[in-house]
Amino acid sequence: MEEITAFRIDIPQADLDELRERVRRTRWAGALPGGWDRGVPVDHLRELAAYWAGGFDWRAQEARLNAFAQYTTVIDRQRVHFLHVRSPEPGAVPLIMTHSWPNSVAEFLDVIGPLTDPRAHGLDPSTAFHVVAPSLPGFAFSPFPEPADPRPWSIDRVARTWAELMRRLGYDRYVAHGNDAGALVTPRLAALDSEHVMGAVITAGLGVPTGEPGELDGAGPEDLALLEEMGRRMAGGSGYGPYLAARPQTLAYGFVDSPVAQLAYLVERFREFDGWESRAEPVDRDLLLTNASLYWLTGTGGSSSWPYYEGAAGLPVDQKEVPTGVTHGGPEVLRRIAERGNDIVYWGRGESPSHMVAMASPASLVDGIREFFHILQRRDGDFT
């Protein structure tokens, strides 16, 4: 059961033809008055869908993904798909990267190269990584078995699965990174496998105020203004979380029967933090459509909502077992709150126009991960 099998994406042409035909035959909803505050506008989605059906080149994106070595293995009765990209640098350190929700390993297409082969990207080659990027259970090429395992895929279960995956690959010491759903998995992995995890670095999520007395002591006007803006954005979300936590099966029918319904949902999530009135697209549309295509072609739009129903939605847990870094941490006051329950060694102030940081601002994420590891090296010595 510990067999690791090479994997290559090869979507049948008939499936691609069917996708395009379904998009063209979409029964469109009428346009409500107002703009993005009521949801994804019809004109915006129709334009994007027309490109999906007529201009988007899936085979080019498939080739981009297949340029990275991919494998599958079965852990705890679940098939796990993962990218495993070895660095050419002799001192490279293993790095497991857990993607966001609703996303896939396509999230990392623009960061794997600089992380694994920094020399080819004009970066210092003394900091390089062997990247392992698994598809979360129920996502894309890690589909749930039929019939589905009734045991919940909790964050702890995913973390244990990742620890086993790294053991099978022969990595005794490694760094862990994650964003969104990945930022929930990463600190649990660090706590559960602290003997092997050197450090945990996430994009954001630590230090969110809870209202406890003294949390905001020392916060200046600028910090308070930033916190107010952050709160406004979080409060202005679409409210999808409670529904998915209660009735994910109901939404799943639309996701697996209508590619445009799936696309609308992804567009909203990918734009959530860019401001609804902005006409900019924070994530390249080919990357967005690659993700939408992966969900559609694998039929995992519904099963990917497992984090909410299983109670995994929320904020990253605190842990002090291993050092923690945050690449896009926000105001310094958040760091002070986060330090109550974490060994924070790096607090980056990177910025991204989208919650999908690796897609919208890949250079800032690469810089943050590399800087975090530099700090680990200076603090704890050479890990190679």
Image (cartoon, rainbow, N blue to C red):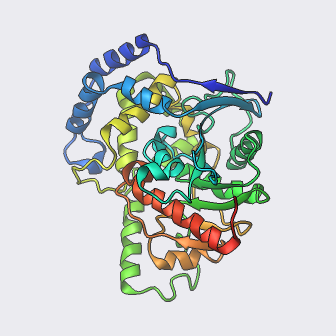
Q: Position of residue 304 (x, y in %)?
A: 55, 36
Q: Position of residue 258 (x, y in %)?
A: 39, 24
- Left or right of 150 on screen, residue 255: left
Q: Is residue 185 above or below residue 41?
A: below
**Residue shown at 47% from the left, 45% from the top:** 113
- Left or right of 82 on screen, residue 352: left
Q: Is residue 351 above or below residue 262?
A: below
**Residue shown at 64% from the left, 28% from the top:** 144
- Left or right of 97 on screen, residue 192: right
Asked if residue 355 shows in the view, the reply is: no
Count of all numbered marks drawn on residues in the image: 0
* Picture quarter with the C terminus: bottom right
Q: Nearer the viewer, residue 286 or 269?
A: 286
Asked if residue 144 shows in the view, the reply is: yes
Q: Position of residue 380 (x, y in %)?
A: 70, 71
Q: Position of residue 104 (x, y in %)?
A: 50, 38
Most extreme residue toward the top is 14
**Residue shown at 40% from the left, 47% from the top:** 359
Q: Nearer the viewer, residue 71 or 290?
A: 71
Q: Is residue 136 above or below residue 198?
A: above
